[in-house]
Amino acid sequence: MPTHLNLPDAYNVRDLGGYLTNTGQITDYKKYLRSGTLHLLSKGSIDKLEQYGVKTVIDLRQNYEVEAKPDVFHNSATVSYIHINMIGDGEVEAFYDQGGDTVNTVSAMYIFWLENRKPYIKEVLSALAASTSNTTLFHCNGGKDRVGTISSLLLSICDVPTMTIAEDYTLSGKFLMKRFFDEQAPPDVTPDNYTWVDYQKDYCPAEAMVKVHKHLKQKYGTVLNYIDSIGVSKTDVNSIKSALLGSI
């Protein structure tokens, strides 16, 4: 099972290890961590991540997010920090109480990124491929949308089934509830009347990620063909695969 690192000052910190592939292999732990923003990390949490093996942090947030809430690793002497503005500047939509429409709204946003930010998607994957000797953490703000899109590509490289990838995506529903009530929930929405299942439906339904992968497969044949089409080298793809599966 995938590991969730329960840090008191960060949200949605999860390992991409523990997933069964179509070929019967299991993705390795301590290679790639996906996470929300790290700007509030205490020294204890920083030490915990470094003890876990983190040597590279890739920050996918927009420029204004980075400036407003600098990553604690941005000037670290022990961890390499890389900032890639994956989606460009401009508002990232919030999805409040959109229910069933979330599937179309969210999937359309992810597909827009995949189709219109190809050089930056490539840059992210190449950076992830270059840092496979230790543990690499990549994060955005909540660790759901930008990170969810990249995570889905990493798991696809390892031939993890689409439904498993979608389930990994929906786990954000469990691990972003504290942030939701801390920062986002309207006054009339409380833990008594709004559960993580409701949040999952409204913000990260599995069907949205399935729809993204359906688009990629319809347009490119396979997700790997999409990754090849944006210029990610076979060497980089194999590096990611080797890191997560131990061999290729």
Image (tube, helix red, strand yellow):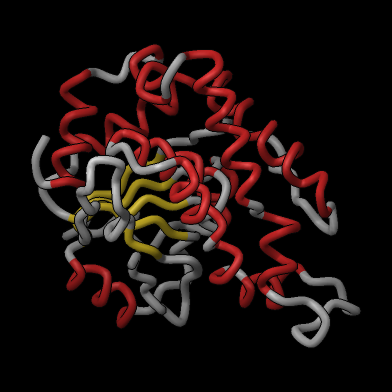
> Which is more toward the observer, 242 or 66?
242
Residue 100 versus residue 212 in the image, above or below: below
130 sits left or right of 160 in the view: left
Query: Number of numbered discs present?
Result: 0
Please identify the residue farthest to the bottom as the structure is shown.
192
Residue at the location (53% across, 26% down)?
114
123 sits left or right of 188 in the view: left
Residue 76 versus residue 174 in the image, above or below: above
Q: Quadrant of the N terminus?
A: bottom left
Q: In x, y percent, where is residue 137? A: 32, 54
> Which is more toward the observer, 200 or 178?
200
Q: In x, y percent, where is residue 38? A: 44, 64
Residue at the location (24% across, 52% down)?
27
Q: Quadrant of the C terminus?
A: top left
Residue at the location (62% across, 77% down)?
178
112 sits left or right of 44 in the view: right
Residue at the location (68% across, 77% down)?
182
Q: In x, y percent, where is residue 222? A: 42, 21
